[in-house]
Amino acid sequence: MNRADGGQSIRMKHSNIADFTWKGKSPMETAEARKERTGLSSNDMTDAESQAVQKTPYRITIQSIRDAIKSVSYWNPPEAPHMTICVATMANGYYLVGKSTPADPENFDEQLGRKFALEDAERQAWPLMAFALREKMSRTPCMVIPVDEVEEYATNHAALNPDDA
């Protein structure tokens, strides 16, 4: 900063963002308030929005993610007891680690910590499962042609018959 007073004369005006509203919704809306208003968790809302624009049968749903989770365990590290770590074991044996930590340790709530850590793990599963689905979709089905029809098929399909190309 190239100011003679080192920037000490700069005054910042803070507004109380808790009172700020935008389009009738507070940007500080809690997950509980959103769930009360909509009946959905963050991941459920994302899933509902995705379903609303779905045009094909191919989509990873939040339910398919939850169905793929075999078990979950939670841990609070001794050096950060306000942090919650969730280890989600997938049905195929893969592990996902979700985490949550309040900015102020005084705001720690064990149940909310577990909920947010599990939602974090679910969000990590989404792109992985989408990749697996896309891989499956990209594989073209293998055509099985009876041996006695191969020559006839090759004659009628120039791409398979280099002499006709």
Image (tube, grey):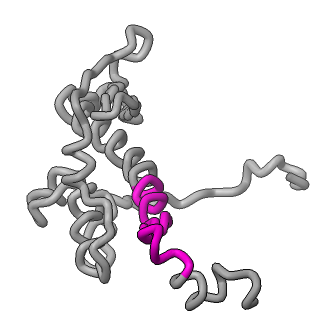
Q: Is residue 9 above or below residue 95?
A: below
Q: Is residue 95 above or below residue 61?
A: above
Q: Is residue 140 above or below residue 120?
A: below
95 in magenta: no
**Most foreground residue, 92 or 130:** 92
**Most foreground residue, 138 or 148:** 148
Percent coordinates x, y for residue 92 in the rendering: 33, 33
| 32 lies left or right of 128 | left
**Most foreground residue, 78 or 93:** 93
Percent coordinates x, y for residue 33 in the rendering: 15, 56
**Most foreground residue, 20 or 8:** 20
- Per the rendered image, the range of residues in magenta is 130-151
> Which residue sits at x=33%, y=17%?
76
> Which residue sits at x=66%, y=84%?
159
Q: Is residue 137 above or below residue 2?
A: below
Q: Quadrant of residue 111?
A: top left
| 11 lies left or right of 6 | left
Q: Quadrant of residue 38?
A: bottom left
139 in magenta: yes
